């Protein structure tokens, strides 16, 4: 892990590669992004996936909710901390984020903004004291991004439905610190 705070790393990484297959992983290892979000794998492969990312001198963030064989329990975070070189985790579960923070991992709390009610209640969803950053989905909503950025002092990562350079620029202009995308065409923006 780096000595820099995640907020500073995100400012240096406007586009984050999010990978959901081994093919995408290989492509992401050669992109300019310093961060890779792991959105696939299982308990048997996750250590090797992280090792490939670390060998490419990039930061590896494991989306805890998407790794097969992991339960939404603190022991799963302990397992990843002890058996991988992951730099951080992503989760929609506050307890997972809290445990990862105790283990000195970077933490990203992912939340979905599906309607006006979820936007109104977003402050209740954000574990301010435990998350280093907030990832919001979908990310192609400039007005909503601007509103959420105004609610928190944490970096905001826009994700989901980021389809092209225009979406990236709109999200950043609205106040997102970074965007993440599974679209390799966006990685080259």
Image (spheres, grey):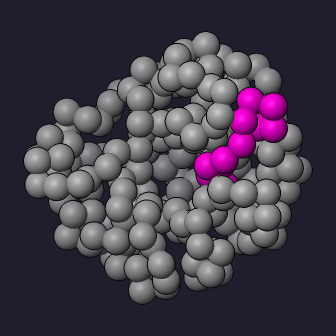
Side (left or right) of 144 relative to 50: left
Side (left or right) of 33 relative to 146: right
Residue 114 location (% of width, % of height):
23, 54
Q: Quadrant of residue 169?
A: bottom left
Residue 154 location (% of width, % of height):
36, 46
| Depicted 3 relative to depicted 80: above or below | below
Q: Nearer the viewer, residue 116 or 42?
A: 42
Q: Nearer the viewer, residue 19 or 179?
A: 19
Task: In the displayed orientation, state which residue is furthest to the bottom.
Answer: 166
The answer, for residue 127, to whether it is visible in the render is yes
Residue 85 location (% of width, % of height):
78, 34
| Depicted 5 relative to depicted 99: above or below | below
Residue 68 location (% of width, % of height):
65, 34
The answer, for residue 13, to whether it is visible in the render is no
Side (left or right) of 64 relative to 177: right
| Depicted 73 relative to depicted 93: above or below | above
Task: In the displayed orientation, state which residue is furthest to the top.
Answer: 75
Q: Main secondary structure of the magenta part?
A: loop
The answer to if 124 sits in the magenta stretch is no
**For the point 43% across and 63% down, which residue is it?**
160
Quadrant housing the C terminus:
bottom right
Magenta stretch: give its range: 36-46
**For the point 81% across and 31% down, which residue is it?**
44
The answer to if 37 sits in the magenta stretch is yes
Task: In the displayed orientation, state which residue is furthest to the front.
Answer: 68
**For the point 47% across and 78% down, which residue is it?**
163
Q: Quadrant of residue 28?
A: bottom right
Q: Nearer the viewer, residue 168 or 2?
A: 168
């Amino acid at each position: 892990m780096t000595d820099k705070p995640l907020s500073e790393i995100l400012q240096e990484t406007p586009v984050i590669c999010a990978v959901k297959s081994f093919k995408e992983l290989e492509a992401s290892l050669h992109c300019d992004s310093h961060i890779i979000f792991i959105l696939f794998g299982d308990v048997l492969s996750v250590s090797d996936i992280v090792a490939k990312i670390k060998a490419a001198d990039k930061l590896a963030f494991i989306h805890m909710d998407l790794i097969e064989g992991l339960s939404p329990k603190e022991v799963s975070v302990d397992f990843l901390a002890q058996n991988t070189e992951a730099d951080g985790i992503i989760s929609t579960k506050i307890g997972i984020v809290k445990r990862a923070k105790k283990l000195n991992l970077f933490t990203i709390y992912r939340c979905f903004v599906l309607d006006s009610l979820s936007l109104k209640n977003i402050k209740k969803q954000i574990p301010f004291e435990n998350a280093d950053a907030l990832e919001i989905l979908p990310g192609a909503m400039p007005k909503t991004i601007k509103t959420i950025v105004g609610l928190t002092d944490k970096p905001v990562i826009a994700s989901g439905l980021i389809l092209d350079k225009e979406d990236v620029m709109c999200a950043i202009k609205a106040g997102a610190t970074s965007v993440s995308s599974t679209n390799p065409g966006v990685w080259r923006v």
